[in-house]
Amino acid sequence: MDTTFEVRVWQIERGSGHHRESYGVRWAVAGKRHRKSFQTFALADGFRAELVTATHVGEPFNVSTGLPERFAPRASSVAWYDFAVQFVDAQWPRVSANHRKNTARTLMIVTTALMDRDPPGVPSRRVRTALTEWAFNAGRRDGAPEDAAAVLGWVRRHTPTMDAWTDPLVVQDVLLVLGTLLDGRRAAASSVKRYRRVLNLVMRYAIDRGVLAFNPLPKGRSRALRTADAIDRRRLLNPQQAAALLDWIRDRPRGGRRLHAFYATLYYTGVRPEEAVALRAADLVVSGSGNPNQWAEIVVHAAEPEIGRTWTDSGTCHDQRHLKGRAEGETRIVPCPPCLVRILRARIQEACMLPGDRFFVGEHGGALAGSVYRRTWNHARIETLPPHVCASSTGRRVYDLRHTRLTTWLNNGIPPAQVAEWAGTSVATLFAAYAQCISGQEQELRQRLDEMQDTSAAYLTV
């Protein structure tokens, strides 16, 4: 048994950190030293008193954790499936729809990896669907159909308790499954990082609830999980390519002008697609009227990412979110050039929009679906770009319109702080993403260096 009565407790030691003092309790169990720090002396003294009392009454101490047996985590009495469901319910009211979806997928992969065997006669696809769409979806779990409920009952009986996480081999197996696709290929590093981020939150929740004593996941960054933050400059569109794509979309007989205004907004303002979807007619602010070369401003106030109706509180496909990196209710202003002002004004007149109407709607009203604008964009690339360009990464994603605009601003000398403000990001993130795309300023910079060199030489001569 992993317990002992060989315990020694020392006096509280006082330490000082960068910001505040701390108080440490030191004790040894079977010769193994332990230490725990507290922010106040009272907390440290209370914990030390618990240890001393346990030794006086003859309570055994756990050698691994260094704590009295009554402090031992409840891992062996809590089933993984039940705990995962509890974690989902605790997170659900305070996280976004996208986070809910990512959590459900992560827990599904982990649960299937922990099962001792597959359900007899049930395809693995049905098991994955039952876990993702019903077990780990707090809004739908109570309405699970009978066949899904039967599958989930089997899964609940055949997943281990939380003490399985104390086995390093189990942890390794789970991490291996998280990094592997169903066909055996390696999963994308960005996906694996997202899965591990969610799993770390689960482990932290288990520690806070006294189910686990420590986080069993390995610490530090793995070299295999490094992702490229910089944007590949080959994804950027040149002005001729962008004009050809926008012209082709505008001339489409079915919804061409409506979608043309959407893509033009992304290209000329650099807003994110989910931010453009949320724009209303009143968000176009024009200070004057009648001037064809009048600049305007667009007030970006919300984002509506398309996640799926099963994950949102509203029951619609688009989640209602505040701007990325900003507090709820905050807005940002983006400059709107005259060419885009004319496009958006024409769109308002053509659709007879009221101030509260959406700028960009689907064919039958409502928010513009991502599947619609992605499909149209793919058709436009095939029809307008040469085959070798279309096969490349140039403008492959609609999001590349934003990348092209932000890079254009930087290459034309707009201060990075201002570009970051317009783009709704930080200067550090801006440089990390677009540093490799900045070009065309070498001649001016060399001229500045020459002037500096001439000045320095003049002083040296004197």
Image (cartoon, helix red, strand yellow):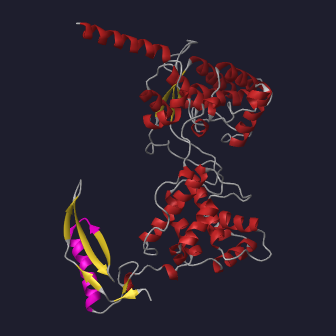
Q: Is residue 164 above or below residue 294?
A: below
Residue 127: image x %, image y %? 72, 68
**What is the chief secondary structure element of the magenta stretch?**
helix
Q: Is residue 309 left or right of residue 172?
A: right
Q: Residue at x 69, y 22 (%)?
A: 241
Pick the quarter of the image with the N terminus.
Answer: bottom left
Q: Is residue 378 magenta?
A: no
Residue 104, by quadrant, is bottom right
Q: Is residue 49 magenta?
A: yes
Asked whether 244 or 75 is in front, the reply is: 75
Asked whether 306 or 238 is in front, the reply is: 238
Asked whether 109 or 358 is in front, the reply is: 109
Q: Residue at x 60, y 61 (%)?
A: 106
Pick the quarter of the image with the C terminus.
Answer: top left
Whether residue 369 appears in this view of the structure is no
Asked whether 391 or 290 is in front, the reply is: 391
Q: Is residue 287 left or right of residue 313?
A: left
Which residue lies most toward the front here?
Answer: 461
Residue 327, by quadrant, is top left
Q: Residue at x 74, y 40 (%)?
A: 364
Q: Give the total of numbered labels.
A: 0
Residue 258: image x %, image y %? 70, 30
- Span colored in magenta: 37-56
Q: Is residue 400 left or right of residue 7?
A: right
Which residue lies most toward the bottom here?
Answer: 58
Residue 442: image x %, image y %? 49, 17
Q: Residue at x 61, y 35 (%)?
A: 357
Whether residue 113 appears in this view of the structure is yes
Q: Is residue 420 above or below residue 211?
A: above
Residue 163: image x %, image y %? 52, 77
